[in-house]
Amino acid sequence: RTKEESELYRLNHRSGNEVTVSEDLYALLSCAKEYYEKTNGRFDISVASLSDLWNFKSETPKVPDDAQIKKTLKKTDYSQVHLEPEHKVVFDDPDTMLDLGALAKGYIADKLKAYLVSEEIEGGYINLGGNVQVLGTKTDGSDWRVAIQNPDSESSYLGVLSTADKAVITSGGYERYFEQDGQVYHHIIDPQTGYPSESDLTSVTIVCSDGTTADALSTALFVMGLDGAKELYRSGSLDFEMILYDGSRVYVSEGIADSFSTNMNTEIITIQP
Ligand code: AMP
Ligand code: MG
């Protein structure tokens, strides 16, 4: 998004309200639309201007002015971005910008996996900075083992998942944040408030055969919190499994409950479909 020669940069710095994009970008924007709709707008890639305002990557980030947040919220609504035939993207608001940070890595991992499959590779492990995607099994036929980081400690794991042919993607407020006046501000934004999501979860891992879905949902379910996550899981509108942590208990959805193990001294609660 910050690279001037990129297609996304050109889309965000368009003149006029209509842009024709490549097939790849259109596919990604369409996925984002589906997740926006299925998460009641908690997953919203039009948070770009809010992310700029919060500027989490800066050396000296600080809490923005509340009035500025309110103003920026007006151009944060992916329902004001329309995907039309022939890869045309139409914006209601000339200033709305899009940010693919929540799902691009998952999409790229899907493409890498497809490439490995096309080269007849039977097993592999792709790790894009914590976004893991496994292909097939290990050479001895046993499942891959993917460790999930403990958000409270860099040197320990929440647990280990045994899996084959799946994306395993985690989001958490501990990944990027700053502190001001004793309060922690992290990089996952609640599009309803414009502030970092006050989630009751500290870590969300999604396990899914599709990496794009896993990446988007890890971010979305973090914003939705425990009850919202359970509700989406039970609705069956998207096919995924999940591992959630609220700082004291681990919640594991039933489909992967037998494949997850932990050494931590915490309660594990199974979420039924
Ligand atoms: P992830 O690490 O996959 O959870 O993605 C976090 C990134 O997604 C942030 O750094 C922002 O670029 C973007 N983001 C933040 N909040 C949201 C949101 N509510 N919906 C979609 N993207 C978001
Ligand atoms: Mg994500």
Image (cartoon, rainbow, N blue to C red):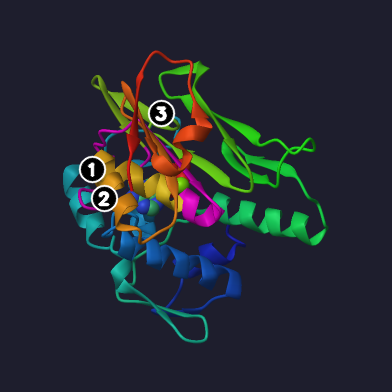
Q: In screen coordinates, is 184 left or right of 263?
A: left
Q: In screen coordinates, is 118 left or right of 44?
A: right
> Residue 171 appears at what percent x and percent y?
43, 38
Q: Main secondary structure of the magenta part?
A: loop
Return the residue at label 2.
Answer: 231
Q: Badge 2, how many Cα within 10 Å: few under 14, some, many 20+?
A: few
- The reply to whether the C-beta atoms of the residues labelled 3 and 2 are less than 8 Å apart is no
Classify 32 as above or below 88. Answer: above
Between the residue at mark 1 and the residue at mark 2, the CA separation in whole angstroms equals 6 Å
The residue located at (52%, 34%) in the rendering is 259
Amino acid of disc 1: Asp
Toward the viewer: 20 or 245?
245
Q: Badge 3, how many Cα within 10 Å: few under 14, some, many 20+?
A: some
Between the residue at mark 3 and the residue at mark 2, the CA separation in whole angstroms equals 24 Å
As helix, strand or loop, the secondary structure at mark 3 comes to loop
Q: Where on the picture, by quarter, is residue 153?
A: top left
> Residue 65 appears at what percent x and percent y?
21, 42
- The reply to whether the C-beta atoms of the residues labelled 1 and 2 are less than 8 Å apart is yes
Return the residue at label 1.
Answer: 227
The range drawn in magenta is 187-215
Amino acid of disc 3: Tyr
The residue located at (51%, 42%) in the rendering is 169
Return the residue at label 3.
Answer: 174
As helix, strand or loop, the secondary structure at mark 1 comes to helix
